[in-house]
Image: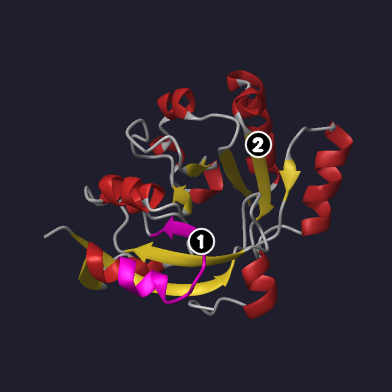
Amino acid sequence: MTQLRISEIFYSLQGESTLVGLPSVFIRLTGCPLRCAYCDTRYAFKGGESMEVAQILTKIATFQCQTICVTGGEPLAQKNCLPFLKQLCDLGYQVSLETSGALDIRAVDPRVIKVMDLKTPASGEESKNKMENLAFLDQKDQIKIVIANETDYIWAKQQIKQYKLTDYCTVLFSPCQDELSATTLANWILADKLVVRFQFQLHKMLWGNVAGK
């Protein structure tokens, strides 16, 4: 039987991406090969519960919600994530995947909305960015960059220019909580006339760092 190791499954409002504010079911997979300095889900690095896919599907059906977000950790670190994403799409769910950008995304079902990070210098994991993934993004997908300081911001601008990121999909800039003023980041974006979308982490504004809301 196909299994996944699950940290938690819960119903909440989408806190990030272009789906922000939309009621969604979150499936958080356990495990991640990265150790970003600002990570707020370290509890998902290990532990969790092995669940049959059939069990997971039964659980999410109880929420009566058609929008699903598969997150982590790093979901793609589990090999069974790929067929699971396809199965969710086949069942008619609107599916988004939150991924670090450090693992190959080419085999992700094309119906899935990919929300892919680019890791900045302040994350400590800049070297893990797999820029080959850009070729497998389309206009429904999103690139998320968490900005912790001015060095990160300048770096992010360079990536946009070098790789023409806004030609691929929507680019999201988020201020790193407790590291960068949201107003400062907003003013930088406006001053430079960047074609990016500023976003807060809505879930933190509503519930702080409490998981499973």
- The percent position of residue 175, horizontal first and vertical second, equals 68, 55
Amino acid at pointer 1: Gln
Select label 1 or label 2 by which is in front: 1
Q: How many marks?
A: 2
Which mark, residue 170? 2
Q: Residue at x 24, y 62 (%)?
A: 53
Gap between marks 1 and 2, in whole Å?
23 Å
Q: Quadrant of the N terminus?
A: bottom left
- The percent position of residue 195, horizontal first and vertical second, equals 77, 33
Residue bearing the label numbered 1: 66
Q: Camera-side residue: 159 or 111?
A: 111
* Left or right position of 128 against 78: right
Q: Residue at x 22, y 69 (%)?
A: 51
* Chain part drawn in magenta: 57-72
- The percent position of residue 184, horizontal first and vertical second, equals 82, 52
* Left or right position of 200 against 54: right
The kind of secondary structure element at disc 2 is strand
Q: Quadrant of residue 23?
A: bottom right
Is 121 placed above or below 2 here?
A: above
Is 64 placed above or below 110 here?
A: below
Which mark, residue 125? none
